[in-house]
Image (spheres, rainbow, N blue to C red):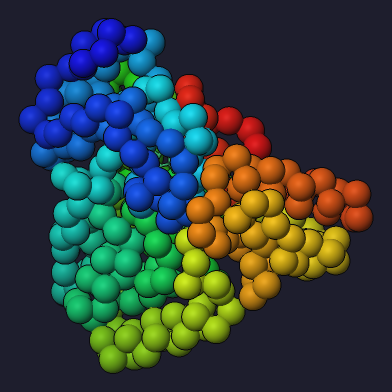
């Protein structure tokens, strides 16, 4: 261990030093994590989290599908929940007096796996998650959504840890979830969640998911590394891609980072783009949209700098 921070708390999982993060993000760029920790189970995470020194910068990584890691990397501990905290379980089946089933998922479980578990069980409500990459924790933080569905619509409650390791059960109301926004207090993390789903024909669910994914393949540049929509849609007026197009930025590039021709709110890594290229491109497009329309777009993707989340 290096001597930058106090020694790490006890851990049954794995601790790696100077670990590349590019391969753990869908944009496939960026630098190293000073430390990367994965856990054996929730108790392992709770113990580690509660004993982690306050001065150690920490960042929870889910599927890495909504984050840009700076080329300088991150000088703290990255907590990877996708290895040990990925269980999905039917907690309560549909039955007499229970018109809805309850599904339990740990924060590191993939949202796609959640959607397919529901399909297998003949449970409807999570079809919109089938094509959204990433983890349950990331989807909770972003209130991920598509095709008219959002995760808040099926969320019963979520278990979170505060910075001292105390457990809290939070509902969509207490989290004030709305379009791509969840008000999780600063420094808290999601550990697990419970979802409500209704019974339906598994074949109908499969066809709905197939239709959603077909739509994605025809409208999104899925052959290149991307982080999905770069900017949030403004609360009123034209959506982000229309503003980007109107500002003449479709196809704009910085180095090997490019605004997709196919969907201009998706920015792609065409080869060996650096995170600096991508950051410059995001700023260039935001400035061009502002100059053209007077609207300041807000990024949906986060930027992880050496000491934590930064503003683009
Ligand atoms: C091809 C493509 C298509 C996409 N389509 C959609 C779409 O249709 N709809 C949509 O909403 N999004 C979409 N996205 C964006 C992205 O997939 C979602 O926002 C996803 O929910 C992010 O989850 P993640 O686990 O990858 O989060 P990460 O990128 O790992 O993290 C995102 C943020 O969440 C935080 N976080 C992650 N886990 C936790 C946790 N357990 N506790 C606390 N904080 C946590 C991280 O610290 C970070 O700040 C798309 C992305 C891609 C690449």
Q: Name the image quarter holding residue 160.
A: top left
Residue 290 horizontal side relative to residue 126, left or right: right
Q: Name the image quarter holding residue 112.
A: bottom left
Q: Nearer the viewer, residue 42 or 40?
A: 40
- Up the image or down, 287 lies above or below 46; here it is below
Identify the residue at image location x=55%, y=43%.
275
Q: Nearer the viewer, residue 222 or 126?
A: 222
**The C terminus appears in which quarter of the rendering?**
top right
**The N terminus appears in which quarter of the rendering?**
top left
| Coordinates of residue 141 in the picture (x, y in percent) | 45, 45
| Coordinates of residue 22 in the picture (x, y in percent) | 40, 46
Quick one: which residue is furthest to the left in this view? 12
Q: Nearer the viewer, residue 255 or 86?
A: 255
- Res. 125 visible in picture: no
Identify the residue at image location x=16%, y=60%.
89
- Res. 29 visible in picture: yes
Residue 66 horizontal side relative to residue 178, left or right: left
| Coordinates of residue 104 in the picture (x, y in percent) | 22, 56
| Coordinates of residue 305 in the picture (x, y in percent) | 52, 30
């Amino acid at each position: 261990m290096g001597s930058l921070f106090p020694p790490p708390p006890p851990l049954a999982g794995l601790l790696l030093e100077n670990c590349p993060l590019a391969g753990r993000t869908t944009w496939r760029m960026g630098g190293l994590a000073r430390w990367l920790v994965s856990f054996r189970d929730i108790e392992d995470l709770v113990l580690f989290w509660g004993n982690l020194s306050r001065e150690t910068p920490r960042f929870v990584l889910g599927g890495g599908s909504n984050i840009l890691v700076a080329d300088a990397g991150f000088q703290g501990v990255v907590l990877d929940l996708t290895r040990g905290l990925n269980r999905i379980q039917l907690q309560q089946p549909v039955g007499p007096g229970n018109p809805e089933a309850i599904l339990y998922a740990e924060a590191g479980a993939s949202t796609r796996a959640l959607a397919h578990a529901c399909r297998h069980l003949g449970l409807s409500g999570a079809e919109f998650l089938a094509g959204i990459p990433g983890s349950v924790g990331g989807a909770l933080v972003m209130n991920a959504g598509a095709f008219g569905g959002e995760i808040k619509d099926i969320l019963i409650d979520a278990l979170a840890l505060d910075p001292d390791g105390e457990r809290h059960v939070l509902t969509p109301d207490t989290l004030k979830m709305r379009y791509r926004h969840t008000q999780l207090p600063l420094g808290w993390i999601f550990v697990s969640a419970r979802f409500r789903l209704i019974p339906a024909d598994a074949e109908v669910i499969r066809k709905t998911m197939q239709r959603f994914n077909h739509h994605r393949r025809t409208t999104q540049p899925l052959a290149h590394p991307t982080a999905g929509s770069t900017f949030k849609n403004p609360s009123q007026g034209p959506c982000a891609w229309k503003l980007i197009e109107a500002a003449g930025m479709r196809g704009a590039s910085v180095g090997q980072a490019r605004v997709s021709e196919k969907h201009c709110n998706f920015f792609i890594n065409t080869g060996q783009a650096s995170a600096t290229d991508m950051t410059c491109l995001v700023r260039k497009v935001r400035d061009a949209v502002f100059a053209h329309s007077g609207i300041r777009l807000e990024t949906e993707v986060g930027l992880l700098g050496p000491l934590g989340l930064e503003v683009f």
